[in-house]
Structure formats: C-alpha cells, structure tokens
Amino acid sequence: MKTADGFVTVARVGEIPPGGVKIVRLDEVEIAVFNVDGAYHAIQDVCTHDGGPLAEGPLEGHVVECPRHGARFDVRTGAVLCFPATAPVPVYAVRVAGDDIQVEWP
C-alpha cells in the first residue's frame, strides 16, 4: 500500500542484513534494496549494459558488480563506476519509518 506521500513498504528493518539485498517487484519493475552498513539504497535490478540482474552480483561497500560482464554501479547514486555500462541505473529514494523500509514509488 502506498503512503499519502508516495512511499511503499518493501521490507522490515532487520530483514535485510548488512551487505545484503532484497528484490521487490513494484508495478512489474524489479527493485534491488541493499543494506550498506545500516543505510538502505534502492536501484532498478537491471544492468544498463546487458540487462543483467544486479542483485545477483557481489556488493562491496556501496558498489555492486553485474554478474554478467562486470559493470559496476554505485548503489547510492546509480552512477556507472566501471565499463562496459555507460548509462546510470535508476535509483529510488528510501526511508525507514518505524520498522518499515519504504521506497518512493511514482
């Protein structure tokens, strides 16, 4: 259920361990929600180079690597950090409301 200000609850605090990820589907779009040292970040779970599932790649700090060809992205900003990708991945605002992890969804 979407809140009045456009956020959707996708997980509970403690459900995604530090260094972990949870994939959620919102309106047919897969979103990867990462826990980086207690801070939550959400990006679209599709590499902009070849469509690879980013949530299946390794996460080192705030950097996720696509398991297909090694493109790297900053999960905080969506910025490309390593080729072969050249376009950033979409990011979504995340907040914690009580025990709920919420993603802003249009």
Image (cartoon, grey):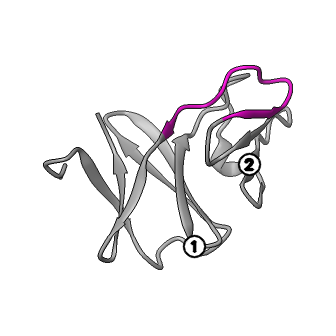
- The residue type indicated by label 1 comes to Gly
- Element assignment for label 2: strand
Res 97 quadrant in image: bottom left
Q: Residues within 10 Å of mark 1 (few under 14, many from 20)?
A: few
Q: What residue is disc 1 on? A: 38
Q: Would residue 24 appear left or right of 1 to someone viewing this image? A: right
Residue 45 highlighted magenta (yes or no): no
- The residue type indicated by label 2 comes to Val
Magenta residues, start to end:
79-91
Q: Residue at x 69, y 21 (%)?
A: 87
When the figure is inspected, residue 46 is found, relative to residue 37, above or below; the finding is above
Q: Residue at x 57, y 39 (%)?
A: 45
- Closer to us: 47 or 36: 36
- Closer to us: 90 or 15: 90
Q: Would residue 89 appear left or right of 106 to someone viewing this image? A: right
Chief secondary structure of the magenta portion: loop
- Element assignment for label 1: loop
- Give the mark nearer the N terminus: 1 vs 2: 1
- The image position of residue 69, as x and y in percent, is 85, 32
Q: Going by the picture, which residue comes out furthest to the left? A: 4
Residue 86 highlighted magenta (yes or no): yes
Q: Residue at x 75, y 50 (%)?
A: 63
Q: What residue is disc 2 on? A: 64
- The image position of residue 40, as x and y in percent, is 52, 61
